[in-house]
Image (cartoon, rainbow, N blue to C red):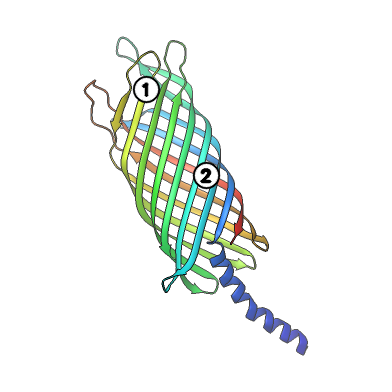
Amino acid sequence: MRKSFLALLVTASLFPMTAQADVIGVNNEVGISINGLLQKYQEISNGTVPDSESGVIPGAGIKVSVMHDVFGISHVYAAVSYRYDLGSASYHGGYQNGSGNQVPLNSSSYYHIQNIKVRVGKGFLLNDNFLVTPYLQFEHHNWDREVAGVGAVMGAHEDYRFDAAGFGVKGDVQVMPRLVLTADVNASETLDSSMRFHAEGGIPGMNFSLGNRPVLGASVGADYRIDGPLHVYTKLAVERFGFAASEVNPMGYQEPTSRTTQISADVGIAYQF
């Protein structure tokens, strides 16, 4: 009985140390993942949705994060992530014929989506199992959208870009040995949003400067330490952003207001350092 009690006491005393190491350790990793991205895009004009697209896009990502004491400041946090998604989505919209009438058009769009996020913050260890980290965030987003032509209707290429700056907070909690759960919310504002358009058939290219809109994001995830420094992780995230309409250009064209919702699922493997 005495030996059992001593063993239990030793285990109880060691677990908080392991917990603290794990909630901080998940922020000292380099990882790679495979991703699935569900994207829904809508253009808004006079309260209607003339163009919309939706589809599941496969991709891959990498991440690096560090959390260390710096110049006497504990748990300084920095992270960089990059993801690339490539695939097709369904397009439902229309075009104007020679008489100026709107004609429905169903086609497909080919996507190249790249996203980079950089974060800097500070962690606060509320107890041995729970770490809260507020942070500042910078994001760069690039979406190449190629709408395939159908019959006499020519295809078009649109390249959307934006930078965004904002803030967020994430929490890491150890719920059992080796397993850490994470929740994250963030809000940003787009900066320097633009779209470059060009189409087949000799139509001249056009550049549109788009208005700024909020970028809202949230995610939940889990990180499990397999053995030593090797981890597996998963994350489910949602992000919503938009573009305000451009000015009418000298040729009489305008890029309308739009909104995009992205839901992504990642599964990856990481190395803790």
How many numbered dots are placed on residues in this image? 2
Looking at the image, residue 17 lies above or below residue 68: below
Front position in the image: 141 or 88: 141
Residue at mark 2: 264
The residues tagged by marks 2 and 1 sit, at their Cα atoms, a distance apart of: 29 Å
Q: Is residue 260 left or right of residue 235?
A: left
Residue type, numbered disc 1 = His
Image point 36% across, 40% down: which residue?
Answer: 162
Quadrant of image for the N terminus: bottom right
Front-lying residue, 195 or 176? 195
The residue under the point 63% across, 60% down is 224
Residue labelled with disc 1: 198
Image check: 20 left or right of 77?
right
Q: Position of residue 217 (x, y in %)?
A: 43, 50
Circle 2 — which element? strand
Quadrant of res 137: bottom left
Q: Which residue is most to the bottom?
A: 2
Q: Position of residue 3 (x, y in %)?
A: 77, 87
Secondary structure of residue under mark 1: strand
Q: Are marks 2 and 1 in contact (CB under 8 Å)?
A: no
N-terminal-most mark, 2 or 1 = 1
On the image, the x and y values in percent for residue 112 come to 48, 33
Give the vertical position of 40 relative to 165 (above or below).
Answer: above
Residue density around tag 2, few if under 14, some if 14–19, many if 20 or more, within 10 Å: some
The residue nearer to you, when weighing 46 against 225, is 225
State the image coordinates of residue 194 (x, y, percent, origin top left): 32, 35
